Image: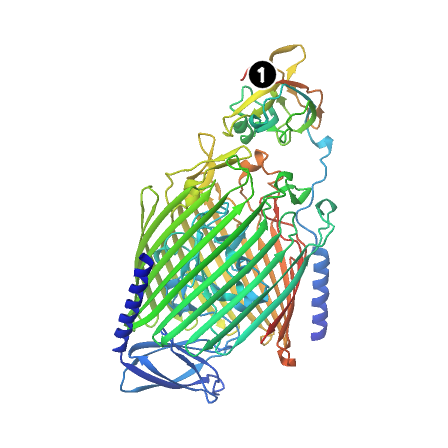
Amino acid sequence: MLKRSFLVFSILLIAYLSGLSQGTTRGTIKGKVIDSETRLSIVGANIMVLGTVLGTTTDKEGNFLLSGIPTGNRQIIISMVGYKKQIKSFSLTSTEIVNLLIELDQIAIETEPFIVTANRREQSLEEVPLSVSVVTDQMIKNRHTVTLDDALKYVPGVSITRSQINIRGSTGYSYGVGSRVLLLIDGIPQLTGDTEDIIWESVSPDQIERVEVVKGAGSALYGSSALGGVINIIPLSFSTKPRTRINFYGGIYTAPVYNSWKWSDDARTSGGFSFLHSNRINHLGFNIGGSRTLNDGYKKNDFLKRWNGWTRLAYEFSPYQVVNFNFGILEQYRGNFLYWKDVNHALESKPDQTDDNVKSLRWNVGAGYKQFITNDLFISFKTNYYRSKWEDNIPTTNDVNGSGSTSEFTVADLQVNYQASLSHQFTTGLIGTYNNVTSRNMFGSRKGYGGAVYAQDEINISRKSYLSMGIRYDFQKLENLPAVNQVNPKFGLTYTLAQNTTIRMSAGRGFRAPSVAEVFTSTEGGGLVIRPNSSLRPERSWSLEVGIRQTFSEFIYTDFSVFRNELWDLIEPAFGDDGFVHFFNVTRAYTTGFEAIVNLSLFNRFLTSSVGYTYLYPKDVNKNEILKYRPRHLLFISSKINVEFFQISFDFRHLSKIENIDHELIDLGIIPDGDIRVPVYVADLHLSSDWASFGLPLVTSVHIENLFQYYYTDFLANLAPLRHIVLSAEIKI
Amino acid sequence: MKKNIHYILIFSFLIFFIEGCDEGISPEEEPLVAEAHGIEGTLYFTNWPPADSVIDLRLVAFLNYPPVDIISEVLQGRAKYTDKLPYGVDSINFTLILNPLPADTIRCIAVGQQFGNNIQEDWRLVGVYYTPGDSSFPGRVFIPPDSIVGGINIKVDYKKLPPQP
């Protein structure tokens, strides 16, 4: 009954809003796009009207014409591969045609100057007061990314500890519960309802246009979990022509050099395939894809078998009214390698853990609606339902057959953008969430709900300075526990010192409400007992940052930032006075440091290179020691050489040795040799050939991950992947 | 000249590749007895209780006596224990390397049993090493540097438990 009422209400709402938009007056723009240096016309440049789905491309003379644009103060984005993107602002009336001459500058360094996540709308990077890194679909493909966290390992300031992401020291390792980084897909949270963790496997790399990594607290716009940063996946746009891509790959792990580590006479292999079809038929755009992933695992009982499927549809009722639908599913069966047996048997787990495995089925379904109400008023409504089910066979004293959990997390998000004038952009929104967890031998049956309201104003103070201020109120209720109320403000300022120099500063508050797992976990096994703690408080943070972006020439781009994050009530598992393990608010901490990024283009674009270095000082104030599982130095170098149809790329990353860990686990003998760890020095090599110039719709590539077969742990007593050689072929039709 | 630079780059890369491989963590070589200090001996068991009441069982060497509790002493670096001992055996030989504890006087050597789920509190001593001829007090053993002291034999009779510290 409720669902039916909701459906009727939605239809009526759409009809009403459609009626409203009929009264909107329209105008027309036309123009020409040329190369600023050669003065020649640019063919195929993209022109998009910001805040609408209206767009076109330039013809063979570089001309374009776009009509039916809502009148008022408008902005268009002009983009073309190899050129610096531009935003043009103008005032449009219904009686006159705006004529524009757009001159694009060639660029040697590909940057992503348009960001959505920082302020919940598309805007120039120059206006963004935060540090933002972008991982493009090309970077994801070049690195043969099977799960997204593999690609994020190369983002400056980011480290991954056993699939848990850590931005500038925010997270460390929290045993798979309570991510301090929020994952969004097209602006909608995608954390599991029980553990509030990120399941990277549920996002297929094929469905990604780009990934935006916002560093620093983002709770003023995105609420709980955005304590250390936000990762927003921008979905792949629809192809204007039918396009199909099929990829096959197969790989092998190199055997370790030490005999005592060799546990299998068989080659350890990986393999799989993926496909994607994208098209637009009249008003309907759609992307559909799927993949199969198989991996024997280089460690014993670390195998993996996975199916992924996904689709995204969008229907344009008119250029001012679009509805979209998306669906994704993941089915996975994998071994559960917890810790090594000891360092002499680093690729084998303890004998009683060699049959542990986990099965999971996760799917999400979502819908969105975008509508221009008036010329300056734009609304979007998004909703998503995410169901996550897992079961393991790991015996506990509660049940020798193992544990499991099913969580259902539903979110609805209504956002309104109002452009009061060319210098004022107002954004506000309402959010509601509902969480339902049913668990076997772990968390019990739990329900929770929440709501939030936020508002933000962005002001162009002058042509050189740009100010943003925002605030968000969050309310969360979990079972019969006291409700969590939180107000998170933010402030940001950018100032253009010179044509190629922008300074920025920002301050924002973050918080993370405890997850169901942290509050309610009750399990026991192996002599350890974990018991609930209903008195947990939310974690809180303040992020401060000052930075400068500088383009020295078309060949050198730099970004330097200094940051400090103050953290209160960090939640960690620890022994209580009762001798049982609980999650407690144990730590008051801060992380401070600086980050330098240099992008270079050398030898007439023959070689492009990016270097990122982050220094981090993560201090546990309560214990007067370094925070656990945080490296102090992070260095990333990526280089790419293009030779006609051939491309070579090389990635190197260094993380300094982790200084502090959970020593209790080693001292008590729970993890043998668990304190053995080294700094990380890992290099990957990628060779790729595009055979299109020979008339073949084929890209072949060789990827060698961990080229130098460097042995290191990516978590306590867990040897990171050995050298992995992968061959892949992609057919593009 | 440009070609030569390419060759130098490729050669350097190959050298770097060959020289750089297989670094990082490696298996540990067996510790030389001369560099380690510890104790060894035999444990004898009789009258085992039901298996579900023996959640954990270890030989523990304490620098202090009486200890606070086994877990606290181990975490504070004042005691060291063996890996989990097997259930149901009549006897077992053991060697416990005490490094990084200092080579010093061990004030109590005992077999500890975890009988409940509380890892901190649910432990008891089920067998204690006594100096031959004196079972009134746990036997003290001086451990010289770089040597393993043998003859640490303990009888565990679950029907006749020692007094708890």
Which residue is more in the foreground, A167 or B145? A167
Res. A589 visible in picture? no
Quadrant in which the N terminus of chain A appears: bottom left
Query: Of all residues shown, which one is farthest toward the bottom?
Result: A61
Q: Position of residue A545 (x, y in %)?
A: 40, 57
Is label 1 in a helix, a strand or a loop? Answer: loop
- Amino acid type of the residue tagged 1 in the rendering: Leu
Q: Position of residue A68 (x, y in %)?
A: 33, 82
Q: Position of residue B52 (x, y in %)?
A: 56, 28
Which residue is more in the foreground, A44 or A372? A372
Res. B6 visible in picture? yes
Q: Pointer 1: what residue?
A: B161
Asked if residue A131 is positioned above or below residue B99 in the image, the reply reads: below
Q: Position of residue A601 (x, y in %)?
A: 56, 72
Quadrant in which the C terminus of chain A appears: bottom right
The crowding category of the residue bearing disc 1, from other C-alpha atoms within 10 Å (few below 14, some 14 to 19, many at least 20), is: some
Tell me: A302 left or right of A458: right
Asked if residue A265 is positioned above or below residue A640 in the image, the reply reads: above
Which residue is more in the foreground, A150 or A323? A323
Quarter of the figure with residue A422: bottom left
Number of numbered callouts drawn: 1
Asked if residue A226 is positioned above or below residue A84 in the image, the reply reads: above
Q: Chain of mark 1?
A: B
